[in-house]
Image (cartoon, rainbow, N blue to C red):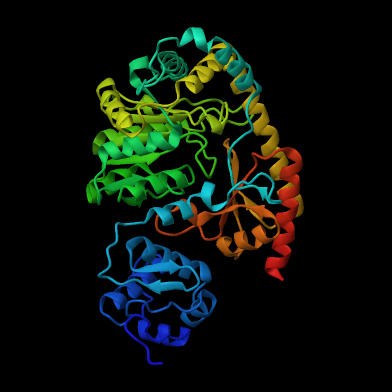
Amino acid sequence: MAATSRHPRRVTAHEFATLLGRWQGGTGELYRQLAERIRLAIQQGDLRAHTPVPPQRELAQALSVSRSTLAAALQILSREGFVEARRGSGTVVRDPSAPFDGLSWTNVLGMMPVFRQPDGADDGVVNLAAAGLDPHPALWESWTRVVRDAPQTWAGAHGYLPAGLPALRAAVAAQVSERGLPTEPGQILITAGAQQAIFLAASAWLSTGDTVLAETPLYAGALEALRSLGARVVHVPNDVVGPRPDDIERLTREHQPRFLLLSATCSNPSGRTLPTGRRREIAAACRRANVLLMEDAAQQQLLLGDEPDPGYLAQHCRPGQSVVVGSLSKLLWGGLRLGWLRADIPVIRNLTRLKGAIDLGSPVLLQEVAAHALASRGAELERDRRAQVSAAHDLAVGNLRQLIPDWQVASCSGGLALWVQLPRANAAEFASVALRHGVSVIPGDMFAYDGGYGDRLRVSFAATPPRLRLGIERLAAARQTFIS
């Protein structure tokens, strides 16, 4: 049967490469050059709608590039709406006349790690993808107390508190103030985890097509929130310390971003913490460039061992120039779904209206449990978690160095995961092989807006010690299969 407009003739990898012609030699990373040339071929009609893209292994060989370079190029084109992945059909060229809203919710859920690697009751897979600790015992003690007293505490109350439980707002404000950023309870909004806090703040400042400056690599959940709002992300280059202040100013002049998003303490996925000197330089750059700083401090309380707590980057900013996002999920438990957002009071009032329109407020009883735990065992909670994280980090690093010595494990100051570089390997391909060996990890391209980090993995060490050891043993077995 002859090919139709809906089902055009398949092109071979060699034909695809020939159609692109000479495309290397321009400026920028190779994968960006490749994406630009494929985009042009689609726009000119050389690659027709619904044309299947040849298998990546064959096409990469025909183009004389690595599979990670090809995958990064296709990822850019997918996000821009030029190609799409179809079940059973692989990647195909999209019909440019078909509506495209930036990214479908199905694709968003498919890329988020929590959905990509579901954690069933016991599916036999060791989950080194999820970066969440088990519940702290203080949670259950507080739960028992709160539930026991609830009939008296909440008699006659309607239970709708969009800004959050006053006691929890006060407890969070006190913790933030103790770290060097003076904060009133009215400057705190309680949210459904740090993820909602990022989404709410981004929603308040962004319109479709607006630009955001961000560090790289960047927390995957933040990237998905920005994608869902139709934002364009421009990454700030790093040096050995972190994001470069001069580039923040330069990129602000070039792109007029709505805000700068970065994590200064225990950044996810790298675990990097910025020294005080760099924090001051970044804050000064933000002042000169007149750009808002949005600081992701979700892992602020997960520093390793005796690492000193540097406080918040925002404390070096001028009033009204920063928004800080935090979490109680790491300290207490992710299942609580409680986070917070710190900003000036007028901003909090506006964000409270936005949150009220979404869910009328986070569950009050869960907020009371958290408030009671912070009031009764606040300092102890953080000591316990830091000790737990330090032991798990040392166990993970020791096992990786013993079982997979050619992997490069980046040093980190805290958090719940290791940022690992694979020698001459496609991390996305390896993650698929690892899953077949019964262990889940996240490939590095999940933490970059437009590709990159194709040779990196995020390996969580939040699992229990026996499961962590087993997971790394399975990674070692997967590596042997992968390189053979």
Q: How many marks?
A: 0
Provide residue 413's location: percent of width, then percent of height. 58, 36
Quarter holding the N terminus? bottom left
Which quadrant of the structure image shows residue 163? top left
The answer to which of 127 and 86 lies nearer the viewer is 86
| Residue at the spot 41% in from the left edge and 33% down from the top edge | 279
Above or below, 193 against 69 in this view is above
| Residue at the spot 73% in from the left edge and 55% down from the top edge | 474
Which quadrant of the structure image shows residue 145? top right
Residue 415 appears left or right of 176: right
| Residue at the spot 34% in from the left edge and 32% down from the top edge | 283
Q: Residue furthest bottom?
A: 1
The answer to which of 294 and 15 lies nearer the viewer is 15
Quarter holding the C terminus? bottom right
The answer to which of 263 and 250 lies nearer the viewer is 263
Q: Is residue 21 visible?
A: no
Provide residue 269's location: percent of width, then percent of height. 53, 45
Provide residue 14's location: percent of width, then percent of height. 46, 87
The answer to which of 4 and 288 lies nearer the viewer is 4
Above or below, 378 against 310 in this view is above
Q: Is residue 75 visible?
A: yes
Above or below, 56 against 253 in this view is below
Residue 184 appears left or right of 366: left
Q: Residue furthest top?
A: 152
